[in-house]
Amino acid sequence: MSTTLLFHPTPHATYGFPNARRLAHVPSPHQQIEVWETPQLGRLFTLDGRPMTSVGDEYVYHECMTHPAALAHPSPKKALVLGGGDGGAARQLLKHACLERIVIAELDDEVVGMARRYLDDVHQGALDDPRVEVVIGDAAHFVESTVEHFDLVVFDLTPPDSPAAGLYTRAFYARLKRILTPCGAISMHLGSPVFHATRIAALLDDLRASFAVVDPLSAHVPLYGSQWLMAIASDTLDAAALFAHDIDERLAARRVHGLRYYDARLHASLFALPRALRDTLGIRR
């Protein structure tokens, strides 16, 4: 039986996908997990009614969340994905031959199990790659207890108005910097400037208070119903300043292939936000 799958990013906005069919409801002690099939975006999953990722457009989000930050680093060896139990971010990071180890710190093992069963087209085997370790448990606890250091940290989490709220704070960024290498960077999704402008401005303020360089970027993600903002933050790296020829050289040297959205020609435009949005979010550079 089909229905219209509706999402409500704010109390005053609704969008959705008609003729959707629910494939599964996965019980979890942490959240409500559902898997849907849609004519527009193919298979997708939700957490507590929020859209997470879809087969039809996941590459837009996951490529933007991983490659600009990874390419800003001259030679990343280790990456940490906070959340990311669907394996999409890890799959993109694995394209970089220089990366030797990727840790996925995922709260909910039911998300990983759901991805293995329903989202092969998203993870494409990344969850079982020998370079990838999946650690089930609270991401904040992992950051507190690990003795490893990471060149990249990807925040592939539920939004700040969720149980992950404590990971979007200055206090957590300070703890995170303890496990970042000197040339390390974090990549974070911020939300929709149409629906979440006030929240995004506060997130950017906290990032700027915690890191020397904060580069916002954006892409339109159909599943999220809007342009979607992300940010790369570091004390040393400036992802927005990369030149196209440097990107091409690093993509070739690392043998990165199979990208569908991101490349050197697109890179600069990801960081080019409209004047009105820069004013709204207090972006000066």
Image (cartoon, rainbow, N blue to C red):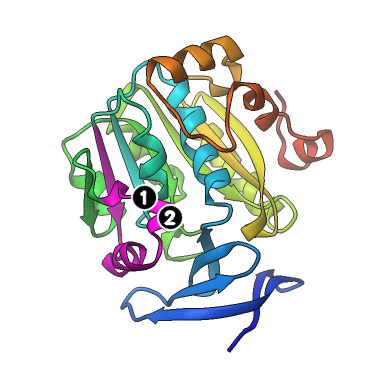
Residue on which disc 1 sits: 124
Q: Are marks 2 and 1 in contact (CB under 8 Å)?
A: yes
Query: Is residue 236 something that shows in the picture?
Result: no
Q: Which quadrant of the figure has residue 151?
A: top left
Q: Secondary structure at mark 1?
A: loop
Q: Which quadrant of the figure has residue 226?
A: bottom right
In this view, the residue farthest toward the right is 276
Q: Is residue 176 left or right of residue 278?
A: left
Q: Which quadrant of the figure has residue 185?
A: top left
Which range is magenta? 101-127
Task: Examine the rendered structure and indicate whether residue 49 appears above or below residue 158.
Answer: below
Query: Is residue 151 something that shows in the picture?
Result: yes
Q: Position of residue 136 (x, y in %)?
A: 23, 59
Residue on which disc 2 sits: 121
Kind of residue at badge 2 = Asp
Q: Residue at x 40, y 61 (%)?
A: 119
Q: Position of residue 18 (x, y in %)?
A: 69, 76
Crowding at dot 1, Cα within 10 Å, few <14 / some 14-19 / many 20+, comes out as some
Q: In terms of depth relative to the viewer, which is nearer, 210 or 250?
A: 250
